[in-house]
Image (cartoon, rainbow, N blue to C red):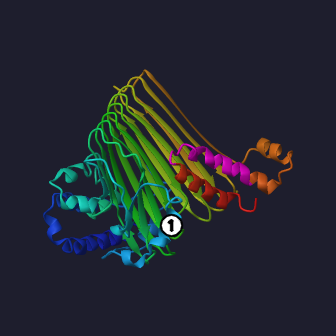
Amino acid sequence: MMAENTEIRNWYLNLYKDFENRLNGEKSRPVHKLRKAAIEKFAEIDFPNLHQEDWRFTDISPILGHTFAYAAKKATGSIRADELSPFLFGGMRGHTVVFVNGFYSRELSKPLPLPKGVVVGSLAEAMKEDDGSIGEQIAKRLDPGTDAFTALNTAFTVDGAYINLPDGAVVEDPVHFLFITTGDERLISQPRNLVVAGKNSQVRFIEHYIGLQPGVYFTNSVTEIEAGRNATVDGLKIQEENRESYHVATTAAFVENDANYKSHAVSNGAKIYRHNINVILGGEGGNTSLEGLYLTAGEQLSDTHSMIDHAAANCTSGEHYKGILDDKSRAVFNGKILVRQGAQKTNSYQENRNILLSNEAKVDTKPQLEIFADDVKCSHGATVGQLSKESMFYLRSRGVGEEQAKLILIYAFANDVLKSIKQDKVREELEHILSVRFLKGI
């Protein structure tokens, strides 16, 4: 394994040399120092393996078995606008920003008018006019050396979603960032997404990852969020890549005084999916809510690792993840809540519930509390089981067939998470996906 890791690491190091040679004038921008520091760290660290506690249930050797190539040019011209309609939530009114193989597509994007001073769009476009402030925000709270995937993403930082809200700005319509992979064999795309919300600002955004065609490819994304004092940031991540692909993601959020960060995550695709989500409640009165739903079948693997760091007093957090597993699929949930010594009056709960539809499906769940303050309210719990026999009996006694009753209960279980999504059109589309998957024939 070590020899294989060395070989694939050298592949990416050589890929970086080619990437850097194509940057031309971009090498003079402030962000390039960050790239170079990240590739140096990448050269020193190994990819995660089963001997590491945070990765002991997730074998990434299938990812390391491929030599993925960086998309050398934009592929916008190969996509028709009408091909995107199934992914636009029934014509929902909102700001649509499209990326193809990691590159911003002006032709496919549909912006709406924005409040004065608000920037919504492409990180690459914003960095063209950057005086260094964007470079200071990238990796501000996230050490590129924490793992090889984060270091790799940072080293190849070029483009991704970008939101910048001045103090008091309110974006009424949701922002839909649509990340498309064309399905070309062995491509890697590495979006670097940045959301900076000034004090008293508000925004809702969607990270939406799709694959248009079959094919083996790799998405390695990093999203950083700064929620300023009394800001409200509501993020939704939808992962519906094709079943041959791989998706590794890191989300890092910092929440200041009285700010509110909400995260929703729905995973329905990819052969291997790993999401690391880390939230620091860094100011008094901060609040975060993490909700997620993962659906697996075949031999899919879904792995969610969360960390909520209560670093300030009088903060609240809640976490509610659910999984539905079928066939020989697997899921991992590892949620940790850390309450630091000075974080008195913390109120936090964590819940992970799973339904196994097959005797061969498996889930490893590990909720954790680490508390160093004495005036707190914290709870956590996890369940793994099958559908309720009592509920099945209730439906059967009212004339519902066994298969239909089973599917209705699955739908109700999953929909419990989706109902908290505020965007009606988005919620309706996700409910439709559930209906197609679990209520077929009813």
Confirm whether residue 31 shows in the render: yes
Q: For numbered disc 1, what is the local secondary structure?
A: helix
x and y percentages locating residue 150 in the rendered image = 33, 57
User: Is 263 contained in the magenta span?
Assistant: no
Residue 403: which quarter of the image?
A: bottom right
- Three-letter residue code for mark 1: Ser
Residue drawn at x 49%, y 75% as measured from the top left: 215
In terms of secondary structure, what is the magenta stretch mainly? helix
x and y percentages locating residue 231 in the rendered image = 34, 37
Instruction: Out of 211 and 99, give the one closest to the viewer.
Output: 99
User: Is 419 contained in the magenta span?
Assistant: yes
Residue drawn at x 86%, y 45% as measured from the top left: 397
Residue 390: which quarter of the image?
A: top right
Confirm whether residue 38 shows in the render: no
Left or right? Give the position of 418 relative to 385: left
Residue extending farthest to the left is 28
Residue drawn at x 20%, y 50% as measured from the top left: 136
Residue drawn at x 52%, y 68% as measured from the top left: 242
Left or right? Give the position of 391 relative to 160: right
Instruction: Out of 263 and 329, give the one closest to the viewer.
Output: 263
Q: Quadrant of the N terminus?
A: bottom left
x and y percentages locating residue 355 in the rendered image = 65, 49
Q: Residues within 10 Å of mark 1 (few under 14, many from 20)?
A: few
Q: Which residues are magenta?
A: 407-423
247 vs 408: above or below: below
x and y percentages locating residue 399 in the rendered image = 86, 49
* Residue ID for mark 1: 85
Q: Quadrant of the C terminus?
A: bottom right
170 vs 185: above or below: above
